[in-house]
Structure formats: C-alpha cells, structure tokens
Amino acid sequence: MVESLKTTLSGENLLTIIGFACTIFVAFITAFLTSKNNNKSITSDYFKREGINVQERILKFWSSLLLYDFNKCIEIYKKNIGLEGKTEDVEIIKLISHDAILYSSKSTIKAIATYQHYLYKNNKNGKKTKEEKNSTLETMKLLIISSRVIKKMKYDFTGEKVDIIDLLKIRINDLDNKKILLSRILIIYYNFIENVGKLIIAIILLIMIIIFKYKIL
C-alpha cells in the first residue's frame, strides 16, 4: 500500500494531482466571487438608491477637502445639513464618518482609514516644525490621501472613474513632471499598503501556477 502511494505521488502523477487541485481551487474561488459580487450588487444598488441625498452630502464634503482646509469643510457640511452653529465639530466628524462607512465600499473605507490615520499621526507628533509640516512632500501626501478617498467614493456613488492626477491639477497649478512622478509613487505606495493581503494571495497562486506549468517538482 505504501509503495502504491509512493508511485501515485511520484513524478508526473504528482504534477497531475497538483494541477487538478489548482483547477478545482480556481473554479471554486471564481464561483464564490461571482456569487458574492452578484448578491453585493443587488444589495448595494437598493441601499444606495435609498440614501442618495446622504451620499451627495458625503461626496461634497470630501471633494471640498481638495479646495479648502478641514475646518472650512466642516463648516460647509454643517451649513448643508442645517446645523450651522448648533453642533460641536467633533459630533459632525462622527456623523460624516458614520455615513461614509454606511454607504461606501470596503476599498473606500480603507482609504478613509488611511486618511484619518495620517491626520492622527501628524497631529500627535507635536515636535514637527512649521517648515516640515508645510513641506512639499507632506502637502502632496495629504492631497494624495484625500484624492484617493474622492476617487473611490465618486466611483461608489456615481460609477464614474477619475484619475487622481486630474484631481490634483484642480488644486495645484504648478503640477510639474517631478510632482506628478512623486504623486504616482505615493499612489502606488498607499495602494500597496492597503492591499498587502490580496498581493500575498496573488503571489501564492502565481507560484502554484509556475510549479504546475514548468514542472518544478
């Protein structure tokens, strides 16, 4: 029995078994994701139709971050919902975060989390000088992070795709090639840190495919 098992698991038989297992795994994942996406699409369409006014307010708030400072955006949002001078800013921030989480996709929520983490980290570090806080790199980071939220949220709510570089051009008049290159690098960096898990899975699948295709074992 042991010899029979060794024969079965040796050479080309082992490659065939691995290939068969990979095929089943890929088929299962494809079917699972298709079913999940269909169900999510039906639920999301209904949910978003019911909250279209809230979505518009949220998108306006995040879009205004590209043009104004944070406190000015809070005041604009309070005015839009009829709470100007009546509610503490911290409560408004909680409301904005709540509505964003309620209506945004997982990808957008990750981008919002990155934005809030950046603000917290920089506000916590009181040792930074004014020059450091106003440096080109820090300015570009903040604009990139907020533009990523706008891009993802606009796609969530309208289905339209926008390029982050185009959003930056609205705010930065002197967006030269160096700043565009820096922007692209920062975009890749933030996309990477938010999708490390997916990248690891993709690498594992790629290794399995290479092993099967080139008969490494």
Image (cartoon, grey):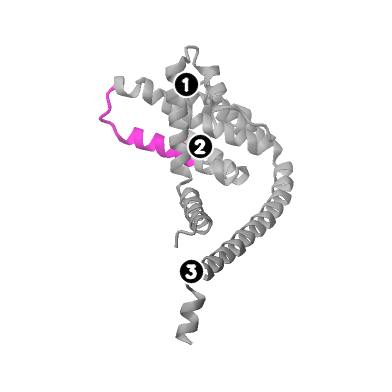
In the rendered view, would you say 62 is above or below 68?
A: below
Depth check: 184 or 73 in front?
184
Q: Is residue 82 visible?
A: no
| Residue mark closest to the camera, 1 vs 3 | 3
The residue indicated by pointer 1 is 180
Q: Which of pointers 2 and 1 lies earlier in the amino acid sequence?
A: 2
Q: Does label 3 or label 2 sit earlier along the sequence? A: 3
Alpha-carbon distance for marks 1 and 3? 52 Å
Residue 133 placement: quadrant: top left
Q: Which residues are magenta?
A: 113-129
Q: Residue at x 60, y 44 (%)?
A: 105
**Residue bearing the label numbered 2:** 93
Question: Measured along the vertical axis of the image, is residue 119 above or below residue 47?
Answer: above
The secondary element bearing badge 3 is classed as: helix
Mark 1 residue crowding within 10 angstroms, few (<14) / some (14–19) / many (20+): some
Q: Label 2, label 1: how many angstroms apart (C-alpha)?
A: 31 Å
Q: On residue 11, which mark appears? A: 3
Q: Give x and y (percent) for residue 64.
A: 56, 25
**Is 158 included in the stretch rendered in magenta?**
no
Q: For the residues labelled 3 and 2, say whether their Cβ atoms are less than 8 Å apart.
A: no
Residue displayed at 66% across by 33% down: 56
Screen quadrant of the C terminus: bottom left
- Looking at the rendered structure, the kind of residue marked 1 is Ile
